[in-house]
Amino acid sequence: MIVLKTISKIIGFINQSIAAIGISAGVAVAFINVVARYVFDASLVWATELTVFLFLWSVFFGAAYCFKKDAHIAVTIILDLMPSRIAKIMLLLSHLVTFIFLCAVSYYGYEYILLVIDLDERSIDLWNIPMWVIYLVIPISFAFAAYRVAERIHGILSTSHDKILKESEAEMILAELGEKQSDNKNEHVKELNNMVKEVEKKTGGML
């Protein structure tokens, strides 16, 4: 368990760091290029491609990190209507499908990198850098995401069916304010909770 926790922390650190550095550096490069183009009339040839690659890495690793926080958009209206036992099975199946998909993309991403290496594909504008370096984002980020989904599957299997469905994000925010739904005596917060549940029913859990 200590090894798994260490791996989880390392993956989380990598995902967060690359996502933050990628978006920050991408914005900085884009800003510098705009200033150079309109102020000094000297556009940077490599800036556009570098910005795209930085955003690409940021988005892919950010998406992988979202699996840890279970932050990806999910329509849970069907799960909410099902008995808890069936909801647990459905949730498990959906995570298994997601895990298989992520593993497949990671594997074929690796296969594609081998092909790019054989072809010696390089970036024309970005300092003649080998493109396999850029494409590494695919197998690595999807492998990290698959690991997170595997963690979620383990969590689902080890959780009782009557506790498997989490509170919605809006309800958790209300709970974080110190107002527990179970023993809450504040009528205003109760009304907010009821409003949240009604809106989620109408929006399919997209709130």
Image (cartoon, grey):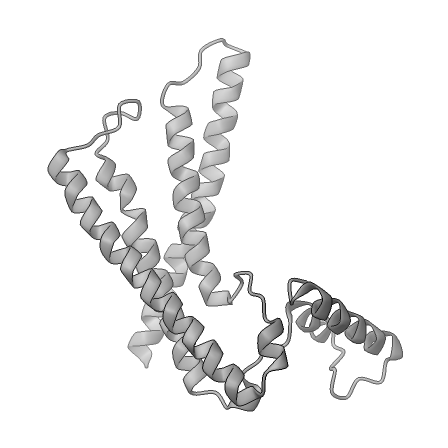
Counting labels gives 0
Quarter-of-image position of residue 172: bottom right
On screen, 180 above or below 110? below
Percent position of residue 55, x then y = 44, 40
Would residue 166 be seen by someone viewing this image from the given angle? no
Q: Is residue 4 left or right of residue 88?
A: left
Q: Is residue 26 left or right of residue 162?
A: left
Quarter-of-image position of residue 117: top left
Q: Is residue 186 left or right of residue 103?
A: right
Front residue (pair 181, 42): 181
On screen, 132 above or below 127? below
Residue at 32% x, 79% y is 2
Residue at 40% x, 50% y is 60
Percent position of residue 5, x then y = 36, 74
Residue at 80% x, 84% y is 184
On screen, 73 above or below 20? below
Residue at 22% x, 30% y is 122
Viewport quadrant of the N terminus:
bottom left
Percent position of residue 146, x then y = 35, 65
Q: Is residue 179 left or right of residue 20?
A: right
Percent position of residue 88, x then y = 49, 83
Quarter-of-image position of residue 76: bottom right
